[in-house]
Amino acid sequence: MLLRRCRSREGPTERLGWSTRRCAGWSCPHGGQRVHPQPVARVSVTAGIRPPVCIAIDPAGLAGRPGNLIPVNRADGERVDAGSLTGVSETALLTLNARAYQARHPNPVIDDPMAIQLADAIDFDFGKFGRRGQETAVRALAFDRAAARYLTRRPSAVVVALAEGLQTSFWRLNSALPDATFRWVTVDLPPVVELRRRLLPSSPRILSIAQSALDYTWMDQVDASDGVFITAEGLLMYLQPDEAMGLIRECANRFPGGQMMFDLPPVLVKRLAPNGMRASRRYRVPPMPFSMSASQLAELAGTVPGIHAVHDLPMPHGRGLVFDRLFPAFWQLRLTKQIRGAYTLLDFG
Ligand SMILES: C[S@@+](CC[C@H](N)C(=O)[O-])C[C@H]1O[C@@H](n2cnc3c(N)ncnc32)[C@H](O)[C@@H]1O
C-alpha cells in the first residue's frame, strides 16, 4: 500500500494535544482546498505515536478495491436496511451514528470518514436515538490509543475486536501506523457481521467471526504468536456479571502476554436504570447489568489468574469546555474515581 501525506493546514483540533493538521483534500468531510487528485482519508493518529496527518491513499489502497476507500460495497448506491439489528445489536447503530456525527463536525473529535460513509449507506431512522454526544467518539479514541501503543511494540500482533459492531477501527489504525501488518479479528453476532460484510471492504488481514463472544471457540481461531490485543468496546456492560467475568477470565487464561481493553459505565447506572436508560422519547438503551468500581477493577490483578496488571486509562480530551476540560479532569480526581465509568486495560502475564 502506498501512502502519501497530503498538504495540510493547521486545524482547530490542537486541543487533542498534538500539533494537528486538517486535511485540505476535496473529499475531506470538513471541506478545504482541493489538493488531492484522488480520494483522501482523514486520519487521526493515536496520541503518543505521531501527530495526525492527512493521508492520501493509493488507488489500490488498503481497502484492496481500486480507487475506493469508501466502505460501501454497493455499486447501485442503494442504502442497506439495518432492520435486522435489534436489542443490544441495534446499539451498534447508535454508536456508529455518534462517531459519524462527531467526525462530520467542523471541529471533529475523531477523524473517521468511513464512519460517515457507513452511516450514510445505512437506511435507518438514526433520529430515534436522540442526542449524539461526544462520549462514543472519545471512547473510540481511548481504544485506538491503547491499541496503537500495543501495536507499536508488536506490529504483527492480532487485534480481536469483540462485539465490534460497526466500528471502523481497523482502518483508522491501519492508516495511523506506518507499514502496518497487524491482523484483525471481528467477533459479533451474525446480523452485525452480515451487515459489516455487505458494507465494509474485505481484507486478507481481517477475519470475521459471526458468533457470540461468549462462545469461546473464537479463541481457537486467533493466532496469538505475535501478540494479541483484545478489545471489548461497549460490550461488557450488556452482559450478565458472570458472563462478563467468565469472558475476562478465559481471555486471561488463553492469551498470556496479551492485553485486553474494555469500558464500563458508572456503577450507579445499573441501579438507577435497571430497565435501561432512556436516550430519547423513542429509544431506550438496553439494560446494563454489569459494572465495577475502580477498586473492584484493581483487584482483578490479585484475584484472576493470568491478570498481571490493571491500568485505569485516562479519558481523552474532546471538544468544548465540558469534554475538553471538565470530564477529563473529573475522570482523574481520586474522589470521583469510584463512581465514574472506566476505560480499563488488563495485562495478561
Ligand atoms: C454498544 S454496541 C458496540 C459496538 C461497537 N463496539 C462500538 O463501539 O460501536 C454493542 C455490540 O455488542 C454486540 N454484542 C452483544 N452481545 C454480544 C455477544 N454475546 N457477543 C458478541 N457481540 C455481542 C452487539 O451485536 C453490538 O454490536
Image (cartoon, rainbow, N blue to C red):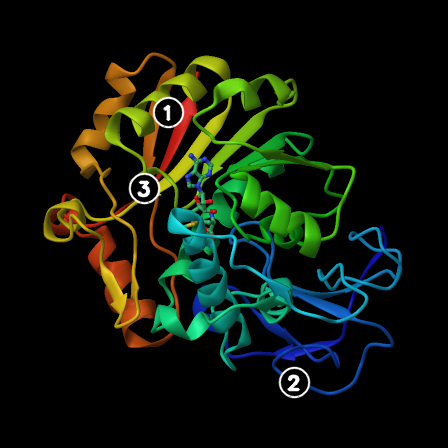
Q: Are marks 3 and 2 in contact (CB under 8 Å)?
A: no
Q: Kindly report the distance in space between the C-alpha atoms of the residues bearing marks 3 and 2.
A: 38 Å
Would you name the residue on which mark 1 appears? 248
Nearer the observer, disc 1 or disc 2? Answer: 1
Q: Can residue 173 be seen at all in this image of the molecule? A: no
Closest to the observer, 180 or 115: 115
Q: Say which residue appears at 20% left-offset and 38% top-offset.
A: 294
The picture quadrant where one finds residue 123 is: bottom right
Seen in the picture, residue 251 relative to 138 is either above or below; the reply is: above
Closest to the observer, 46 or 201: 201
Closest to the observer, 111 or 312: 111
- Ligand 1 falls in quadrant: top left
Left or right relative to 309: residue 211: right
Q: Kindly report the distance in space between the C-alpha atoms of the residues bearing marks 3 and 1.
A: 14 Å
Q: Earlier in the sequence, mark 3 or mark 1?
A: 3
Is the CB atom of the residue marked by disc 3 within 8 angstroms of ligand 1's nearest atom?
yes
